[in-house]
């Protein structure tokens, strides 16, 4: 098995180098004096940035792009064996690794390799912990699944022993990682196009926890159902956090300001520290995320004052309750929520945000998720006063023909909720222009391209 050693630069080729994660790691290797080349289907701002650094990017994937001077090839999960560059690398016998395996190999180069996992909240919590490490001048290398303003993108190349990254459970990709410290924020039913059921998901998180060495640490939420199946007999140190269940780290005396941003007093090992931590992001769910970051930061002996200032400086990441602007006095928020638990958390948080009426334009993400969690989606979306559904964003899936946004509309009507379905974005925009009034709050929600609706309205 080929192992990436950042102290021994080689020549790397990235198939699909323009992806947000692939591009970040291509830049990281380039910064460590690797010769990095790669290909992508189309030119973009990301590939232009890579080219500006001196990384050679070609457009269109051709057999002849793969040459014998390449030491190893990295490819995305979307690349299949019939890809000409994939086949060329195989024919030449070059070492090959999928993106997640590459991330895992990079992690081996750091003394403190932190993986933030959980069905929800990974990007936010990774960003929170990153802010804390930055405020503590610990010079971390950071890989986050969104755009974080503090690092002007999704990657930061540090020069310390600290590496912080998201660890995603989908297709068990995080099982290729090599964390010395891990966080499990929550475990929920999702990605049921890959996992059999919730027990299968728990088993995956158990295997992730087992990756942490005996001298490492796992920070885990006590609110996780059947938690013992994940943490029993682990050799590493376990630190717990939670809002309700007597955890090592708890939050009490919760308050929310006029913008819906939370604050809490920190309870550590059953004792109220009397120290209040203020957040600049909204919602009770972000208090839980912050607790996990506090717990892990204190494990690394970061002073609490630096933890507090780091958390307060974090104002969110792109597409996580991101204020986009306004039209005719209506505030437009965009949010990545695409699972019922996330929708419920976002809409509950929005109830504390200044508004007259709450509008939600929801774009379901994948047929399999919509079908598996249909009733849960209907219940969660019912928290908004006005709901508009657009077509399901297929992403990686083909239309099975037995599920649609109209199915979700009917499920919501069974709950007594009035909901509209409009397939065309332009029609949705016209509807909102006609019906939203000054002081209303509009949330565009989903992991697809629904963000365009709010952006177009702001430009009108």
Image (cartoon, grey):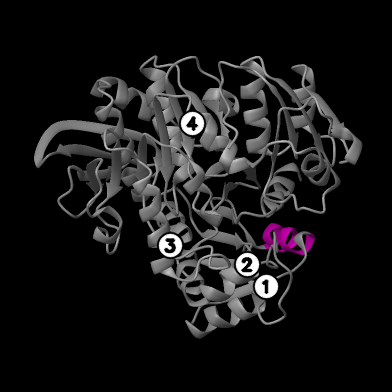
**Is mark 4 in CB contact (under 8 Å) with mark 2?**
no
Which residue does the numbered mark 2 point to in the structure image? 388
Q: Quick check: is 430 in the magenta stretch? A: yes
Q: Look at mark 3 in the image and give the residue it sits on.
A: 201
First along the sequence among labels 4 and 2: 4
Q: Residue at x 9, y 42 (%)?
A: 270
Q: Check disc 3: other Cα within 10 Å, few if <14, some if 14-19, many if 20+.
A: many
Quadrant where the N terminus sits is: top right
Residue 232 in view (yes/no): yes
Image position of 197 (left or right of 22): left
Secondary structure category for the residue under label 3: helix
Quarter of the picture holding the C terminus: top right
Residue at (44% x, 24% y) in the render: 110
CA separation in Å, label 2 and label 3: 31 Å
Q: CA distance from mark 2 to mark 1?
A: 6 Å
Question: Helix or strand or loop: what does disc 4 sit on?
Answer: helix
Residue 324 among those drawn in magenta: no
How dense is the environment of label 4, judged by Cα within 10 Å: few (below 14), some, or many (20 and up)? many
Q: Is residue 259 visible?
A: no
Up-down relation of residue 185 to residue 421 (above or below):
above
In the image, residue 60 sits, relative to residue 313, either above or below, namely: below
The label shown at residue 421 is 1
Label 1 crowding class (10 Å Cα cut-off): few <14, some 14-19, many 20+? some
Q: Quadrant of residue 63?
A: top right
Q: Measuring 14% from the left and 51% from the top, which residue is drawn there?
A: 246
The residue mark sitting in front, 4 or 1, is 4
**Where does residue 343 sit, x and y in percent of width and height?**
48, 60
Specify the farthest residue to the left.
271
């Amino acid at each position: 098995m080929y192992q990436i050693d950042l102290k021994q630069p080689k020549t790397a080729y990235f198939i699909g180098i323009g992806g947000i994660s692939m591009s970040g790691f291509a830049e990281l290797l380039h910064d460590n004096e690797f010769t990095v080349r790669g290909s992508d289907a189309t030119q973009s701002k990301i590939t232009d940035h890579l080219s500006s650094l001196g990384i050679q990017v070609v457009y269109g994937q051709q057999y002849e792009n793969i040459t014998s001077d390449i030491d190893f090839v990295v490819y995305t999960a979307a690349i299949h064996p019939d890809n000409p560059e994939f086949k060329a690398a195989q024919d030449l016998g070059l070492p090959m690794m999928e993106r997640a395996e590459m991330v895992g190999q990079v992690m081996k180069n750091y003394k403190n390799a932190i993986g933030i996992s959980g069905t929800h909240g990974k990007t936010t919590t990774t960003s929170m912990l990153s802010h804390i490490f930055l405020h503590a001048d610990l010079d971390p290398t950071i890989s986050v699944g969104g755009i974080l303003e503090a690092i002007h993108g999704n990657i930061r190349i540090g020069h310390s022993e600290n590496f912080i990254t998201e660890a995603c459970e989908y297709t068990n990709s995080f099982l290729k990682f090599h964390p010395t410290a891990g966080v499990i924020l929550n475990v929920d039913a999702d990605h049921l196009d890959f996992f059999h059921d919730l027990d299968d998901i728990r088993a995956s998180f158990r295997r992730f926890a087992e990756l942490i060495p005996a001298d490492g640490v796992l920070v885990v939420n006590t609110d996780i159902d059947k938690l013992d199946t994940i943490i029993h007999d682990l050799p590493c140190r376990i630190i717990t956090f939670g809002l309700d269940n007597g955890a090592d780290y708890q939050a009490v005396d919760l308050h929310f300001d006029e913008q819906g941003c939370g604050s809490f007093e920190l309870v550590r090992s059953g004792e109220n520290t009397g120290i209040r931590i203020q957040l600049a992001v909204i919602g009770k769910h972000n208090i839980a995320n912050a607790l996990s970051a506090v717990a892990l930061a204190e494990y690394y002996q970061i002073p609490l004052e630096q933890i507090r200032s780091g958390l307060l400086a974090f104002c969110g990441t792109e597409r996580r309750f991101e204020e986009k602007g306004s039209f005719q006095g209506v505030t437009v928020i965009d949010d990545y929520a695409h699972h019922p638990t996330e929708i419920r958390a976002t809409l509950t948080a929005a109830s504390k945000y200044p508004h007259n009426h709450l509008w939600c334009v929801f774009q379901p993400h994948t047929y399999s998720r919509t079908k598996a969690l249909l009733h849960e989606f209907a219940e969660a979306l019912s928290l908004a006063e006005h709901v508009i559904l657009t077509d399901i964003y297929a992403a990686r899936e083909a239309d099975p023909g037995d599920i649609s946004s109209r199915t979700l509309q009917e499920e919501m009507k069974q709950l007594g909720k009035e909901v509209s379905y409009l397939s065309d974005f332009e029609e949705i925009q016209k509807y909102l222009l006609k019906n939203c009034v000054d002081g209303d709050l509009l949330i565009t929600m989903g992991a697809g391209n629904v963000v365009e609706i709010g952006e177009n309205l702001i430009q009108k």
